[in-house]
Amino acid sequence: MPIGLSFGPELASEDDRVEALVARLVADRVASRLYARDTTLWDTDAEASERLGWTDFEANALTAIAGAEAIRAELLQAGVDRIVLCGMGGSSLAPEVIARWSDVQLSVVDSTHPDFIAGALGADLARTAVVVSSKSGSTIETLSHRSAFTAAFRAAGINPADRIIVVTDPGSQLEADARGAGQRVCFADPDIGGRFSALTAFGLVPTALAGADVRGLLADACAVREEFTRDSPTNPALRLAAVIACGLPQQYVLGIAEAPGAHWGLGQWIEQLVAESTGKAGHGVLPIALPLDAPEFTLHPANLMRVELSASASEPAQRTLGRAGFELAVNGELGAQFLLWETATAMIGHLLGIDPFDQPDVESAKIAARAVLSRDADTDPAPAVLPLVDVAAAVLAAPAHSTADSAAALISEVGAAIPANGYLAIQAYLDPSGPYAPALAELRDALASAYGVPVALGWGPRYLHSVGQLHKGGPALGAFLQLCDSGAGDVEIPDSESGFGTLIVAQARGDREVLTSRGRPVFALGSSSPAELIAALTSAARTR
């Protein structure tokens, strides 16, 4: 059997509720209607009418793979064997997972931090091809990356048309620009939304160019498709949806760990798929990708369902998740897991009565960032700052009652701001390739242990295209700790009035303004020494 689910001992107490939801899904013929592209499963005016192409993916996937294989052969003949992917959200998360699964090198550019961009542009361009991937063709980060790489290739005496490959929907402005520049264009299926695009050109073209076994990945997905279309209580996708929905609204956080043998980073892709699809109208499921030794798995907060991913259906669950609780193991090859989670997520939308294919609050953060960029600096006063006396940092934003003047006081206030049955999200507008990245993971663990709540860690602006929708549109149960690098330099964005340094500041500020307007508590810190700030916060959390 290519996919399997198994359950921890405490699931027996929830059997009746799970089976009732399974029976409802079977009676509503949700599986067969989903794969028949029946949009009445949700609102009749739903985005679903143009977003269900992923249910019949094979033909378009094979076309995308064939095109990518031809381009790869041309690149290798020219001595180009390093692939860089510029994309955000659904355009980058699945390719990153596929590359790890297939053990091939794929450099992903999904940050606007100037130091990260400088490093990406300073790599060996003589061996590099760049995939620019955007469904809408208007993603500000990706268009900025494209401009920067275009200029870098020209400066190195390389024709950008030979090295830039664009993946986008037919008719987008990006397609027109790429055609005008003589660049190769690979089309995605316009009837598939970004986060459901793992088995489309967005997931397959960059990874095929990097040498991944995408035909094997596709075969694993095709092997389970028929099973997922059946209105049967044994349908694994239907059962997965029922188990997750059964825990709502109390148990809305999925702590997702990968068992030994599965080191794909699939949990980060699931974060976007599930959170962005369900986090709206006050509803939502928040997946958090965690290591197996994360504090949450021993502390087991009441709002957390522990989920373990295994690489093969024949591989038993590791059963390493400590205390008795509502546990779930999902076993299967990567292609099968992609389709399983996509199908189950669409079914959860049906059970919650929401449209899983729109993302209204993702756009709100983009609008806010553009507004910050367009403001006149003379009329936009700088935010009041409160310095932390024991660390090189300043409080850029905090709830009105905040008087924190030290790392310890701030840690105490953050903990007090987390709602009952809530979670904390660290939003790191820092360099993801920086030397402090491991220390940031230690801070996450320290905060989870100190507060006894689930703690998510997201790099900005990457998370804006992932769980950012749930932060603003989902349950009002989050508190937010935003870390900003006030000492970063700048890297020019060609043909733009601003640089990457200005852009990342605008994105951070725009998001916290939207969160604050929704009544979410946000603590934003700026430091010219992120490593020092992270160390001070970690120490304060450990001694709390």
Image (cartoon, rainbow, N blue to C red):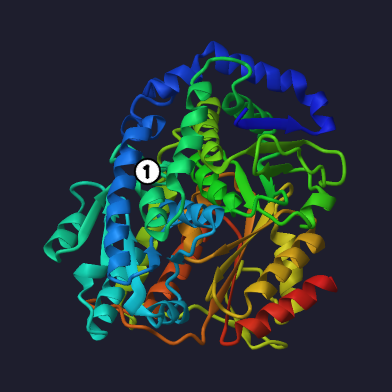
- Residue type beneath disc 1: Thr
Residue 450 figure quarter? bottom right
Residue 252 picture location, percent across and down: 66, 41
Q: Is residue 511 left or right of 307 when viewed as pictured?
A: left
Farthest residue, direction right: 323
Farthest residue, direction front: 77
Residue 491 picture location, percent across and down: 36, 83
Q: Is residue 339 above or below residue 16?
A: below
Q: Could you tell me which residue is drawn at 41 percent across and 59 percent down?
A: 88
Q: Is residue 496 above or below residue 201?
A: below
Visible residue check, residue 202: yes
Residue at the disc numbered 1: 200
Q: Could you tell me which residue is drawn at 60 percent across and 41 percent down?
A: 285
Q: Secondary structure at mark 1?
A: loop
Nearer to the camera, 68 or 231: 68
Residue 52 picture location, percent across and down: 37, 32
Nearer to the camera, 381 or 16: 16
Visible residue check, residue 353: no
Q: Is residue 110 left or right of 298 when viewed as pictured?
A: left
Residue 234 figure quarter? top right
Q: Label 1 neighbourhood size at 10 Å, few (<14), some (14-19), many (20+)? A: many
Farthest residue, direction top: 27
Nearer to the camera, 496 or 126: 126
Q: Could you tell me which residue is drawn at 69 percent across and 55 percent down?
A: 290
Nearer to the camera, 330 or 379: 330
